[in-house]
Image (cartoon, helix red, strand yellow):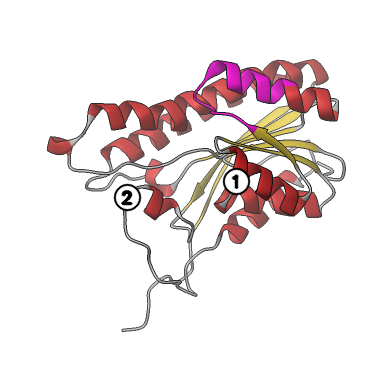
Amino acid sequence: MELKSARALITGGSDGIGLAIGRALAEKGARVALMARRADRVNAAAKEIGALAITGDVSKPADADAAVARVVQEFGGLDILINNAGFGTFGALTELNLEDFARTFATNVTGAMLMARAAAPHMIRQSSGNILNISSTAGLKGFANGTTYCATKFALRGMTECWREELRRHNIRVTLVNPSEVQTNFGVSAGGQARPYNEKKLRAEEIARAIVGALQIDDRGFIPEFSVFATNPFLPS
């Protein structure tokens, strides 16, 4: 698609991968809206890249509907939805907390569904659009202490496949993106310790560039799913 003047809404857009995608799209001439829960952070991020700031929680139906309606009103339509909002909670099966489990699913899975549900009717009416779900390599293979997070990403993959089958007839492309470990504040937000910067590991910019490349394919074709790994993330011994 032609990204110049394309209309994009990115959830979890106040930092990390979401902000990097917003910046990359804005540099291509797209009109970008960033959505996040904290007004101060999303306002600052939007100001930084010249985007529209939307405060809202993707897990709340009213917020999801309002965010899409705002973009359609401000931009005259919606061409790209990027479901990036998400976080992780980790722990052994025998120690899982039901509230954390439900809270993670509410954002990572229900939130993505609510945003896509709100966006799809607009894209169907215009017979075009792109929905990109930012998953993880944790949605391809499970690991110890990853029950909650991996389950949300496996669920997101399943939803993506369902939407793809429903929406292809309307010229809407649905893509799943599986980043490997990316150096953002994700680990700290999940309760882990901050890690030193590693020059060999992925940055948010690599994911953003890959997404821009996938979007720029002529609309007669699309990439259903792709993963991005660091070539050699291991520090020398």
Viewer-nearest residue: 91 or 120: 91
Based on the displayed image, in which of its 4 quarters is residue 2 positioned? Answer: top right
Identify the residue at the far front of this view: 40
Residue at image location 67% in from the left, 20% down from the top: 66
Residue at image location 76% in from the left, 41% down from the top: 32
For residue 104, the mark is none
Q: Alpha-carbon neighbours of circle 2 within 10 Å: few (<14), some, or many (≥20)? A: few
Name the magenta segment's main secondary structure: helix
For residue 166, say whether it is visible: no
Based on the displayed image, in which of its 4 quarters is residue 68 positioned? Answer: top right
Position of residue 220 measured from the top left corner of the image (x, y, whole percent): 78, 36
- Which range of residues does the magenta coloring cover? 55-69
Q: Is residue 172 left or right of residue 191?
A: right
Viewer-nearest residue: 119 or 13: 13
- Element on which disc 2 rests: loop
Q: Is residue 63 magenta?
A: yes
Position of residue 197 measured from the top left corner of the image (x, y, whole percent): 45, 71
Counting the numbered discs, the total is 2
Residue at image location 60% in from the left, 46% down from the top: 41
Q: Nearer the viewer, mark 2 or mark 1?
A: 1
For residue 225, say whether it is visible: yes
Give the amino acid at mark 1: Arg
Say which residue label 2 marks: 191
Position of residue 204 measured from the top left corner of the image (x, y, whole percent): 57, 57
Q: Is residue 103 magenta?
A: no
Say which residue label 1 marks: 41
Above or below 140: residue 204? below
Identify the residue at the far left of this view: 94
Q: Quadrant of the N terminus?
A: top right
